[in-house]
Amino acid sequence: MAFRSVNILTKLAPTIVAFLRDRRRWLFFGGPREVSVEAHRRRAVSLRKSIEQLGPTFIKLSQILSTRGDLLPPAYIEELSKLQDRVPPDPPDAIKRVIEEDLGKPVRRIFERFDDEALAAASLGQVHRARYKGEEVVVKVLRPEVPNLVRTDLHITRRILDTLNNYIKHYFLTAFTNIFDEYSRIIIEEMDFFQEANNAERFRENLKEAPRIIIPEVYMELCTPRVAVSKYYEGIKINDVEALKRAGVNVPKLVKDLIEVYARMILIDRFFHADPHPGNLIVQPSSTPGEEKIVMFDFGMVIRIDEEMKDKLLRTAVAWARRDIDELVTCLYNLDIIEPGINPAIVVDAAHELVEIIDRYNLSSERRIQQYFTAVLDTFYKFPIRMPSNLVYIAKSGIMLEGIGVCHDPNFDGARAATPVVKRMLKTTLVDPTRSPVEYALKKFKELKVMAHDMERFFHRATRDEIRMHIHPVDMIEIERFLATTTHRIMASIFVLSAMLVTAILYSATGSGWLLGGGLGGSLLLFLIIYALPSRPKR
């Protein structure tokens, strides 16, 4: 672990120190420094190369960060987006050894045939084709060295973040720590192939009424935390435009069905496949146009949205669409994405800018979801507000689906295509038909009860003078600048006063009028120069 810690620090320390110096020129003191776009670009390239050398843990973390334009400047987003989760395959003997250790039998006794050549190889797992009980199957195996490496990397990175948080209080560091905590949970789940098999079974149940969607059957008797076996399907990659045209696939209908399925997963099931890139979606052509089927793979990255969070997200979207500033501000607070102590005026400004985004892009804009999401991220980057992680994954899925549509039609507008589907489903999701008026009233009564309890606690603490004010880091920086400037002026004034006293003492001893006039004039000039200095350092 010690060697790995040194390796991680060596690769990442230059970038960490550079970011800290952007805030304070000499790390522990000094004002922020100006960094050119070109310097950010050079730093981003260096960071990407370092991450590539560090391996799977940091590659997958960076892929998540590449969607967080609310935290990173565009140069870093662009470079981190270039990271690919593709690696050379492990030797087949190493893969077979994992299968035999987990299933307790030689591979030749489990499968009638096992292909040594890998179908696909990523940083966490490797896929091989095989034959089991007369059926063609795919065998997904966790790489032998990955679990220990990932857990070691997570442990080391967490210790680094804890150390930094102890000494540095900054919004971006806190936000990154929150992202890292969520990522740690997700990657641990991704390494559990038995959980992935259960996810696939749940998707099969949820989507059983979607006849054009195929979720491969899973052979649960062969699934372990390191091995997953499912039925093999052949097809055409969903972004292979020419092949789909030759097969006579009705692509517009296909994309519409895919949007319908994702809307259902997010709005109704609240359990959705968060990685719909073209490698995880293939199309099975049909002799009957419009009857093609979509096969979905890889259910390691799934996102669960509880009922309360879903309601909050929907109400925020409705307030945004209606341009209701007051309601939007309330929704932003309800989402718990506002840092404690932030000036409410900043939240209102952010809400106004979010509303302006709607008017900035018209219905004919290409890649409208992409434009919306980029603009929203830019807004969150300007203001000290966290982007809800669930919303990031939803938007990421929407952008990927829109990208699939654009592959086939350059003028494809994902927002326009999704609007009627979402409106139809909102009728059943905003008002739960299974909830009786009594249940709804009880829910509201409980909310009022909690609110009354919070008010009682607030006034009780107020009577004991226990109310504390929390200052947001953005405001703290301004206070630090003011105090630093004021302190410098006080010290300078003391120096000038001392110089005047020395001049008076020397005059008393020598009686020289020239010495007195020169000393007092010089002290006064020095005082005026110090007082005329800028009240705050340049950004």
Image (cartoon, grey):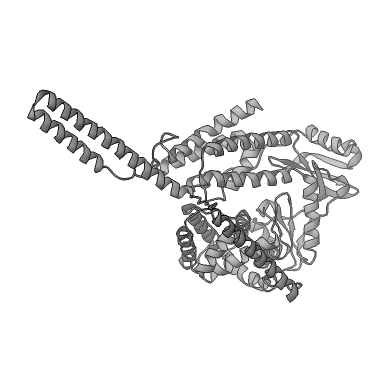
Residue at left 57%, top 46%?
A: 65
- Between 489 and 306, the one lying in front of the other is 489
Q: Quadrant of residue 241?
A: bottom right
Q: Residue furthest bottom?
A: 437
Whether 85 is drawn above or below 340: the answer is above
Q: Is residue 322 visible?
A: yes
Q: Is residue 245 visible?
A: no
> Count the marks: how many?
0
Rendered location of residue 27, percent (x, y):
45, 35
- Between 384 and 367, the one lying in front of the other is 384
Rendered location of residue 436, percent (x, y):
75, 75
- Between 185 and 36, the one lying in front of the other is 185
Q: Residue furthest front?
A: 464
- In the drawing, does residue 433 fall left or right of residue 9? right
Residue at left 44%, top 47%?
A: 476
- Between 98 and 186, the one lying in front of the other is 186
Q: Quadrant of residue 345?
A: bottom left
The quadrant the C terminus occupies is top left
Rendered location of residue 363, percent (x, y):
51, 69
Q: Quadrant of residue 485?
A: top left
Rendered location of residue 145, percent (x, y):
73, 33
Residue at left 43%, top 45%?
A: 477
The quadrant the N terminus occupies is top right
Whether 329 is drawn above or below 222: the answer is below
